[in-house]
Amino acid sequence: MAAEKITAEKRNEFGKGAARRILRENKIPAVVYGHGNDPIHLTLPGHATMMALKHGGANALLELDIEGDEQLALTKQVQVDPIRRVLEHIDFVAVRRGEKVTVDVPIHTLGDAAPETLVVTENSTVQVEAEATHIPEFIEVDIEGLQAGTQILASQLVLPEGTTLVVDPETLVINVTQAQSAEDLEAELAEAEAEVGIVHEPSDDDLAEAQVEAAAEDADREGGVAPAAEGGDEE
């Protein structure tokens, strides 16, 4: 993963008021932690930083130019406004070239499993150790043609060279199960509703069908012919 260069400015104002002023200028407040140093509070250019994070993914690595000093920084937490979807604050961890770091890497599936199966991603990320400048953006898992009952564990993942697994090797990542039919889903829903006491009012069609069935039973007992349901076609 190549580090994208971003020019940063140190800042001495803190708090919500200062953060709002920075955001109004289309910039982003940030802080860099790590290596036993005091936190470095920064202001980053909004658009350039947003694009760098978009290209780098969840573990984007930036090369920050802080007033002439270069600092590699690994993205650890990004705060996003839930309404406007704009970046509000970023936490970084200072790293060095060649240094190994522990990160959570997303899982991406490739292909389609066998028909009538359901693919469940039990863990959407796995924790690995890699060099700060060679963190995989994601780990691919080929599920093409997999049959129901297939399970893929963390130990079975194909990791890039230089990347090692940190999470328990027995961690279930992908689980391929038999897809449920519509009838099974309806039966499960009805059972769940019955357990919590949910009762549905019968529809007009259900009532009409019940009336026809009752009339048919009466006609069978009396040897007659059941009347047609109300609203039916007349000959």
Image (spheres, rainbow, N blue to C red):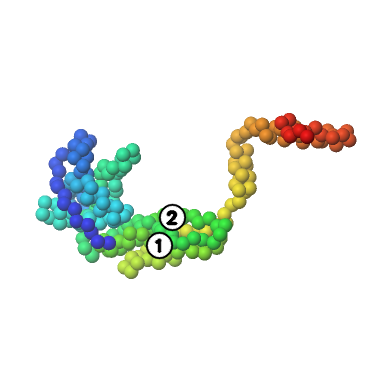
Q: In the rendered image, which quarter is residue 197 located in?
A: top right
- Residue 228 is situated, as x and y percent measured from the top left of the image, at 77, 33
At x 15%, y 56%, the residue is 70
Q: Can the viewer see residue 73 in this picture?
A: yes
Q: Is residue 23 left or right of residue 179?
A: left
Whether label 1 touches label 2, CB < 8 Å: no
Q: Nearer the viewer, residue 94 or 232?
A: 232
Identify the image quadrant of the C terminus.
Answer: top right
To which residue does mark 1 refer?
140
Badge 1 local density, few (<14 within 10 Å), some, or many (20+)? some
Q: Mark 1 or 2 closer to N-term?
A: 2
Q: Is residue 107 left or right of residue 34?
A: right
At x 40%, y 62%, the residue is 140
Q: In the rendered image, which quarter is residue 189 located in?
A: top right
Query: Residue at the right extreme?
Result: 223
- Residue 9 is situated, as x and y percent measured from the top left of the image, at 14, 47
Q: Is residue 1 left or right of residue 216?
A: left
1 or 2: mark nearer the eye: 1
Vertical relation: 158 (above or below) 17: below
To which residue does mark 2 refer?
123
Q: Nearer the viewer, residue 205 or 10?
A: 205
Q: Nearer the viewer, residue 174 or 82?
A: 82
At x 85%, y 37%, the residue is 220
Please, what is the three-letter code of the amino acid marked with disc 2? Asn
Query: Residue at the front extreme?
Result: 235
At x 62%, y 38%, the residue is 194
- Residue 212 is situated, as x and y percent measured from the top left of the image, at 76, 34
Instruction: Determine the secondary structure under disc 1.
Output: strand
